[in-house]
Image (cartoon, rainbow, N blue to C red):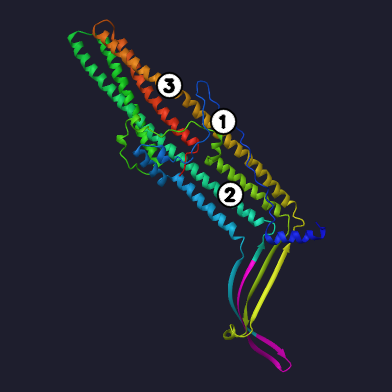
Amino acid sequence: MNKSRYPIVIASLMLAGCINMQPNYERPAAPIPAQWQPSAGQAKLTGDTLSAELGWEQFFTDNELKKLIRQALENNRDLRVASLNIEKARAQYQIQRAALFPKVNGTVSGTNQRMMLNLPTGPMTFNSHQYSANLGFSSYEMDFFGRISSLRDQAVYQYLSTEEAKRSAQISLVSEVANAYLTLAADSESLALARETLRTQQATFDLSKRQLALGSINELTLRQVETSVESARVNVAKYMTQVDQDRNALALLLGERPNINLEQVNNLQAVSQTASLPDGLPSTVLQNRPDVLEAERTLQANNANIGAARAAFFPTISLTASAGLASPELGSLFSGNNHVWSFAPQIVLPIFNGGLNKANLKVAEVSREISVAQYEKAIQTAFKEVSDALALRATLEEQLSAQTAQVNATQRSFVLSRARFEKGLDSYLAVLDAQRSYYAAQQTLISVRLSEVSNQVTLYKVLGGGAF
């Protein structure tokens, strides 16, 4: 190409608005394996897709829990803050976008003056009138080098980042409400078990007092029975406190009083059903997690900011222009040949500013590198969270099976030890020990069941939580 044509080509690009100083954005490579590796005893995961469209209304099947989640999404204060941040970011984007267009103003003015002139014949006074009506734009910057468009892009990505922050808050809120609801069900079930244990122990204690009066048992046996009664009373009080605290936690998450009867939430198995998650779990699904997308949007915003910092090294071209009418008589302002106009282009070329532009560019470049590291850390954190949930998932089924067998075994032991005591073959101490083991096994079974369903909720959350 003829070198003499270079200025023409550059000028054409400038007028077309094609010069942009932003670096080309490329998503950083994910610093994690492509697939989760199964841990010891864990079945190898298969498949290559995971639907991100499984919303919480499809994942959770309990209707009462769905009501609470809807209530929380409408009233939770933290979620309101996230929504207001989105409105703020949207307004900021509109501010930056408005700079791409000229600001058009209409003005109407009138000036009246009384003047005095010293003439040879003596002083003379007269009145001067001037009226004008103008329409024009002021301080309109021609975005030849992409400074304004880069700032607009930065505002767009910041807005998108807040959108992802809200979705992340929604997913966290849904999982917290679900876990609080499931914990309430588990603690209510434990409370019911403690009350039933207290009832049976109290009945045994009443019977033992009659037996002592008849001389069929001694006082030591009576006191051993009494210890089991008091232990059951302690457990009832403990779980009553936990149930009340669970209800308070739910009320805080919901932002108001629950709109369901929480007294009926007293059986974990009855409320713990969820939709099944597929076994195919490639690590690429993490790039759709809202916190990871939020980090990437921040990275894109800082990438766009580099374009604005680079453009500051180039001339700034701004225009001020107006067209209108002027007349010494108000009545003739809009008649006759009274047209006036002004056109005032201005070019500002940065020559010396103490290294300010270089410093701003360096800040923008370092900010982008920080965002890259934060994006990579977000992916690594997400990978760890999913790996931890899968590791627990791999052993929970075995834990549940073993704990169920332990409950059956301790129940049989309790029945046999009680029968031996009633026949006078053992002391009541053996019965008391067997009863404690049976009660503890039942409580642990409830805890394992809670861990199993909570793990499903956690896995749903850390995989991205579906659509809203």
Which corner quadrant holds the N terminus? bottom right
**Badge 2 amino acid:** Tyr
Which is more N-terminal, label 2 or label 3? 2
Q: Mark 1 points at which residue?
A: 35
In the rendered image, the vertical position of residue 15 relative to residue 356, given as above or below: below
User: What x and y, as percent, mark residue 289?
Assistant: 53, 39
What's the magenta region?
115-138
Do residues under tags 2 and 1 come within 8 Å of each other at their CB atoms? no
**Badge 1 amino acid:** Gln
- Residue 121 on the magenta segment: yes
Do residues under tags 3 and 2 come within 8 Å of each other at their CB atoms? no
Viewer can see residue 255: no
User: What x and y, as percent, mark residue 379?
Assistant: 57, 36
Q: Name the residue under label 3.
A: 399
Which corner quadrant holds the C terminus? top left
Q: Residue at (52%, 47%) from the top-left corner?
A: 163
Residue with the most extreme bottom position? 121
Quarter of image, res 420: top left
Mark 2 or 1, closer to the camera: 1
Do residues under tags 1 and 3 come within 8 Å of each other at their CB atoms? no
